[in-house]
Amino acid sequence: MSEESGIKVLVTNQSNNDRIIRAVIAVVLILAYLVMPSSVNDMIAFIGLGIAGVLLFNAISGNCYVYRALGINTCPLPEN
């Protein structure tokens, strides 16, 4: 089976600016979780951690499945 056949799972569809913004937001959410007082609802904190995890995955892989589903691609086209 050739590499070109089939569906590519991890296709880069984010620009470097998108990736940096997502990584910064993820770090802020993780730090907020660590600094947050224990009186805040745990469910809200875990939702924030989940969002941070998704954003970190997107930032590291350069792939956003929401962008892919909507047909959005902010990654610049490679020059030939």
Image (spheres, grey):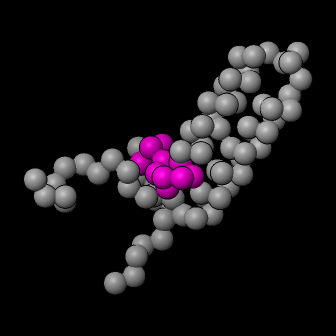
Q: In the figure, is residue 39 to the left or right of 30?
A: right
Vertical relation: 74 (above or below) 40: below
The residue stretch that appears in magenta: 58-68
Q: Is residue 65 on the magenta stretch? A: yes
Q: Residue 21: where, in percent of width, then height? A: 67, 55
Q: Relative to residue 36, is residue 62 drawn left or right?
A: left
Q: Is residue 43 above or below residue 31?
A: above
At x 71%, y 16%, the residue is: 43
Residue 3 image point, x, y percent: 19, 58
Q: Percent position (x, y) of residue 63? A: 46, 51
Residue 46 figure quarter? top right
Return the x and y of residue 45 as percentages of the image width and height. 74, 24
- Outermost residue, left direction? 1
Residue at image x 74%, y 38%?
Answer: 29
**Residue 66 forms part of the magenta stretch:** yes
Q: Residue furthest bottom?
A: 80
Identify the image quadrant of residue 18.
bottom right
Residue closest to the far front: 34
Image quadrant occupied by the C terminus: bottom left
Magenta part mainly helix, strand or loop?
helix
